[in-house]
Image (cartoon, coloured by chain):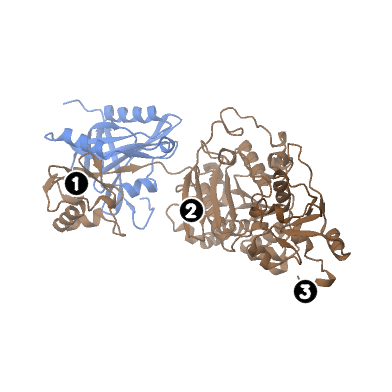
Amino acid sequence: MRKTHYQNEIASSVYSVETDEDIMARIISIAEKEYPYECCGILIGRCDDHCFEISDAYETCNHERSVKRADSFTIGPMDVYKCERALTGTEYEIIGFYHSHPDRPAVLSVKDETGMLPGLLYVLISVSAGMRKDITAYIRINEIIHEATMYCENRPKG
Amino acid sequence: MKVYISATLRSFFGRRTETETQGNTIRKILKDLTDRYPEASKGLYGDDGNLRGFIRIFVDDEDRTDKSFHDDEIADGSTVLLLPFIAGGAPGESIIPDERRKEVSLDDSEIDRFSKHLLLREIGVKGQKRIKAARVCIIGAGALGSPVIQYLAAAGVGTLKIVDSDSVTPENLQSQVIHGTRDVKRPKAASARDTVRNINRNIDVTADNTRVEADNVMSVIEGFDLVIDCTDNYKTRYLLNDACILSRIPLVYAAVYQYEGQVSIFGLKGGPCLRCIYPEPPAPGLVPTCAEGGTISPLSGIVGSIQAVEALKLIIGIGENLGGRLLTVDTLGLKSKFLNVSRNEHCPLCGNSPSIYEPEGFNYEEFCGLMKEEEEIPVEGYTAEELAEKIESGEPVTVIDVREPHERAVKSFPGASVIPIGQLVRRMNELDPEHDTVFICKQGLRSILAIHTLREAGYKGPMYNLKGGMDAMKDIIFSNEAGWL
């Protein structure tokens, strides 16, 4: 358990994330490709109270000003809207977002914590010298931020 | 009105994505929504009553989140979208590398002393260790240096170097709060060092009494993580800028004048330097220094404190710093604003094809206009003693005081005619070209400018400058005007 702030304490994890290697490899390759800038995107899948299942990842444009892209990201609200519309009628929904931290650790920054929407999954990828270093996942439930345990398996398709 | 609510906001509105609401403005729609979903109100609005940063409201394709749109009537058939704004980013990068941080530790007394820092999530033990590991060089222990040095010492910066070649004078005490009355005539660097030791004896503090020149500036700042510009003159300011850029040391810059100040950071990766913003300093005499123009006492406290905060943010690696932005503070109108400043690719120092590689390589006197490149007729002048003697002996001398009215109110020159510098050319015919005319100002710089201005305007009479201005006359009392000082 990692204590960071009296308001936003990170509690021990009862949350888990399940995904397969293909999706993770895709997110990692995007993060490495965008280095030294931050990449960002939308995570699609299903979730229940404690388990997030990532079925797909959708890369979005980092809308930050160019000088800020090395340590900031912004996903345009309309990108989220379009993605959501495309998912209408399917069994999937937006379950969270991912972004990378070039040359910085995969821990939530103050900016990250301030912008976190409750109930959604935030996956962080730290990239050092163009190579993936670490991947973490966080969820905010009310004012409390939980680190989720990630399970990544090579699942058969379908 | 039909409102689409993004499913990502489900923790506020449940899983409903489309809903019919009462009202034809954003304000009314939000009111209706929060009435129906009382829980959403806490999620949508912060403690200050404003919409939280992660909420965006679109009407059709237009972002209408800003409050100014909330009372605009929405046309029938429009779609109102309540969407998330997803943003964040990596934690800031500290100028103190992790290896340096790991080399230091905090003992019990330090944990006690810096507990207010340790309580801050962004600082914590790691941040405090970075502060302790930091080596900061402060150039100038005057008005700006006073808050900078004291706050950095109090914040726990482990190594401080204070560079100033001046000594404390009584007039310094109005704004240079690091010195006290008993420090008058002591070197400023030593006086400031003693104040630092009084704050925290564990700080490794050095007082350097040398004057920063082109040939020593590189060695003065060598080995430091950060340099703070607390100087009051253009020459040192350009020297420091050049040396910091060449040494790749970030520089926290500030300047104050009368009621206004400005702060920025130079030498950050991709950011501008002083020469990108101000390629050349103004001509001498055109802009008075603080010593001549004056400053309101707490101004340098405000501006210097901002410098100290920026320095700590760079050391800890948090927040949004002033790299690429110039903050201006106007204490009279109580206004402040940011000016975006960017690196100039043609900058001779940090541009794409720089021409400056060594601070020794060029003449600062010439650059700063202290030495005129064109053949300007030199201005003849009198010292204070010579002028006093002339007046005492009864020689006919016309004295023109070019100072502003409020300056004359402090100390007037007996028998002088008053023509403020801006009116000189217009009122040239009030001068008698057949007689010697002596121009006076506070420090003898604006009077030189006055003489040049009149020469350019075609005045042919003999003109003399009072060297050192009224300040130099301070200790001279005319026998016939014993009470004038």
Amino acid type of the residue that numbered disc 1 sits on in the rendered structure: Asp
Residue drawn where x is 23% and y is 39% of the image:
B61
Q: Residue B483 carries which label?
A: 3
Amino acid type of the residue that numbered disc 3 sits on in the rendered structure: Gly
In the image, A95 versus A111, the foreground residue is A111
Q: Position of residue A22 (x, y in %)?
A: 27, 27
Quadrant for residue A156, please give it: top left
Cα–Cα gap, marks 1 and 3: 88 Å
Q: Chain letter for blue?
A: A
Residue picked out by circle 1: A49
In the image, B134 versus B328, the foreground residue is B328
Q: Which residue is situated farthest in the bottom direction here?
A: B483
Element type where label 1 sits in the image: loop
Q: Where is residue A7 in the image (x, y as percent from the top left)?
A: 34, 57
Element type where label 3 sits in the image: loop
In the image, B405 versus A121, the foreground residue is B405
Q: Which of marks 1 and 3 is in front?
A: 3
Which chain does the numbered disc 1 sit on?
Answer: A
Q: Would you say B383 lies left or right of A48 here? A: right
User: Are tags 2 and 1 found on a single chain?
Assistant: no
Residue picked out by circle 2: B125
Amino acid type of the residue that numbered disc 2 sits on in the rendered structure: Val
User: Are tags 1 and 3 found on a single chain?
Assistant: no
In which quadrant is the C terminus of chain B drawn? bottom right
**Res. B179 visible in picture:** no
